[in-house]
Image (cartoon, rainbow, N blue to C red):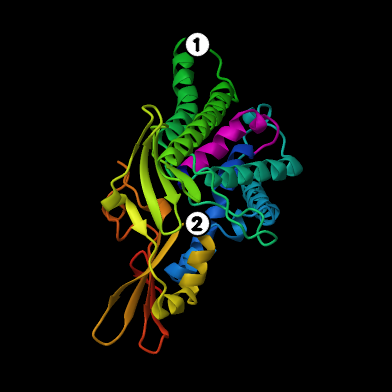
């Protein structure tokens, strides 16, 4: 999921009552809920290196205890700085929960687990058992940005503030820990959305199987509408991209447009698959399409890597995703006449 949804989820988890148990719970859980994405710093080494490490160790069960310790350590430093400057007011001391570092560590683990869970729900996937099990898992039940979930989380954060303003106008006493009910409502609503979409995803796959007898069938979500799915059905010689509406029970496919035949293997594609980009891409991709897409006059061959899970349009996407030939997460490898890799690019950004 995108970062803001992660931050809001961590804050909502804290507001369910955990912020009443230990000081700094909201701060720590909000940070923990987004902390695994610190692996984006690997992109400083280039787009292929960033792609290699994205959703890597920081998104594993093995890495979470170390991340929780780092976050708690950061909060401890902040606490020492804050108390050292005498910023804790006496009038607040009676309303704040005590500092409980053990509980705060546990709460950080909960926030970190929420990140893995949210990332699992979209179609990019996670591999939480790495390095013991390198398999990628993708629930693919919600889009990478789901407006419904985002709106519910924002409501849970904003509503207590406005109701507090109304209460202050009529003379009500200000409550120290507001928003517990709204936070619980938001989290329950999110689980409800997941369950609804899980059922509709299964319905979409069943409908697709009536159209194409695929070896593998995988459904990708559209934002907002739980009845709209893009389904990939693999046959021995092709991939079929199906537009499925589970509410109406319809499956649409244009054979000219939505059947992608498996490209042949060439010497250039074999060399590209042995490159760093090729190895990383094929390790991650569930439905890779690797094909030779051009040869220049000097004999340099371009090999393109695409993943069928990202080759569909939504109202939230434009530009790259509207192109069948250049969807998001497209990689290219340039292979020289000697079958050596001359250049690698990820999303049109060269690896230097």
Q: Which residue is mark 2?
A: 286
Q: Which residues are magenta?
A: 5-23
Label 2 crowd bin: few (<14), some (14–19), many (20+), radius 10 Å: some
User: In the rendering, at what x and y percent does residue 54 appear?
Assistant: 52, 60
- Seen in the picture, residue 71 relative to 107 is either above or below; the reply is below
Label 1 belongs to which residue?
171
Task: Specify whether residue 203 is in view.
Answer: yes
Residue 149 rendering spot, x and y as whole percentages: 46, 33
Please name whichever residue, 7 or 152, is drawn nearer the observer in this view of the structure.
152
Q: Element under label 1? A: loop
Give the Cα distance between marks 2 and 1.
59 Å
Residue drawn 25% across the image and 81% down it: 296
Residue at the extreme top: 170
- State whether residue 42 appears in this view: no
Q: Secondary structure at mark 2?
A: loop
Relative to 342, say whether 347 is above or below: above
Q: Viewed as shown, does residue 222 lie left or right of 138?
A: left
Q: Nearer the viewer, residue 105 or 82?
A: 105
Above or below: residue 290 compared with residue 269? above
């Amino acid at each position: 999921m995108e970062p803001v949804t992660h931050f809001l989820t961590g804050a909502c988890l804290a507001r369910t009552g955990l912020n009443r148990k230990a000081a700094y719970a909201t701060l720590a859980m909000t940070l923990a809920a987004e902390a695994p994405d610190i692996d984006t710093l690997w992109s400083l080494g280039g787009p292929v290196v960033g792609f290699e490490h994205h959703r890597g160790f920081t998104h594993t069960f093995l890495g979470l205890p170390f991340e929780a310790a780092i976050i708690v350590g950061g909060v401890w430093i902040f606490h020492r700085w804050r108390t050292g400057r005498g910023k804790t007011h006496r009038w607040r001391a009676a309303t704040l929960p005590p500092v409980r570092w053990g509980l705060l560590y546990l709460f950080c683990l909960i926030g970190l687990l929420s990140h893995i869970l949210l990332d699992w729900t979209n179609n990019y996937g996670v591999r939480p058992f790495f390095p013991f099990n390198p398999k990628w898992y993708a629930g693919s039940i919600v889009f990478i940005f789901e407006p419904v979930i985002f709106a519910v989380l924002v409501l849970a954060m904003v509503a207590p503030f406005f109701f507090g303003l109304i209460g202050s106008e009529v003379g009500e006493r200000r409550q120290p820990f507001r928003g517990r009910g709204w936070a619980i409502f938001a989290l329950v609503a999110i689980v409800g959305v997941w369950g609804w979409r899980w059922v509709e995803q299964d319905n979409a796959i069943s409908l697709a199987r009536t159209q194409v007898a695929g070896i593998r069938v995988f459904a990708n979500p559209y934002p907002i509408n739980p009845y709209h799915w893009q389904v990939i059905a693999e046959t021995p010689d092709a991939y079929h991209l199906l537009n499925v509406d589970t509410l109406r029970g319809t499956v649409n496919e244009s054979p000219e447009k939505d059947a992608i035949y498996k490209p042949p293997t060439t010497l250039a594609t074999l060399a590209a698959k042995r490159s760093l980009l090729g190895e990383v891409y094929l390790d991650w991709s569930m439905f890779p399409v690797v094909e030779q897409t051009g040869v220049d006059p000097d004999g340099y061959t371009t090999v393109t890597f695409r993943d069928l899970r990202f080759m569909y349009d939504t109202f939230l996407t434009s530009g790259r995703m509207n192109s069948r030939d250049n969807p998001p997460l497209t990689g290219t490898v340039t292979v020289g006449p000697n079958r050596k890799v001359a250049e690698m690019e990820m999303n049109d950004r060269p690896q230097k």
